[in-house]
Amino acid sequence: MMVEEQWEYHVEVLGGALRGAKADELDAYLNQAGEDRWELVCVHQPQNSNKLWVNMKRRLTAATRRQRSRLEDSW
């Protein structure tokens, strides 16, 4: 029987109303996300905005399920 892969997704908004994300900040953020096993899906910049929407995904594993359940319990 084939096990279906499951994913979790995360959207991060970088930059602000007055200035966009600097290249070195974006680089540092993506490197940290990569260490946490996030994979970049796409980056979107809304029209007339300095903000970047960074969309990422990673495989949902037993460890990330436990981490998510602890975060949900704290809400």
Image (tube, grey):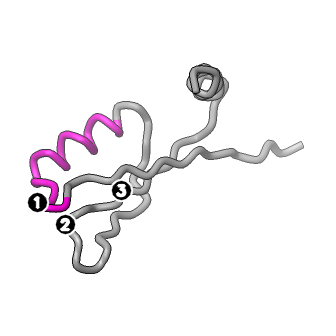
Q: Secondary structure at mark 3?
A: strand
| Distance CA(mark 2)–CA(mark 3) | 13 Å
Q: Is residue 3 left or right of residue 40?
A: right
Please give left or right for residue 5 compared with residue 35 in the image. Answer: right
Q: Nearer the viewer, residue 15 or 26?
A: 15
In the picture of the structure, the residue carrying the numbered disc 1 is 19
Mark drawn on residue 65: none
Please identify the quarter of the rendering in which residue 21 is found. bottom left
Q: Residues within 10 Å of mark 3 (few under 14, many from 20)?
A: some
Which picture quadrant has residue 51? bottom left
Residue type, label 1? Arg
Label 1: element kind: loop
Dot 1 and dot 2 residues touching (CB under 8 Å): yes
Q: Which residue is mark 3?
A: 54
Amino acid type, label 2: Asn
**Residue under the image location 70 percent in, 46 percent down:** 5
Which residue was labeled with disc 2? 50
Q: Is residue 10 magenta?
A: no
**Foreground label between 2 and 3:** 2
Q: Which residues are magenta?
A: 17-34
Please identify the dominant SS of the magenta region. helix
Task: Kindly identify the amino acid type of the residue bearing the numbered disc 3.
Answer: Val
Q: Are marks 3 and 1 in contact (CB under 8 Å)?
A: no
Binning the other alpha carbons within 10 Å of mark 1 as few (below 14), some (14 to 19) or many (20 upward) gives few
Tell whether 9 sits left or right of 49. right
Q: Secondary structure at mark 2?
A: loop
Marks 3 and 1 sit apart, C-alpha to C-alpha, by 16 Å
Among the two numbered marks 3 and 1 on one chain, the one whose residue lies closer to the N terminus:
1
Q: Return the disc, 1 or 2, that comes first in the chain's sequence.
A: 1
For the point 14% across and 45% down, the residue is 25
For the C terminus, the quadrant is: top right
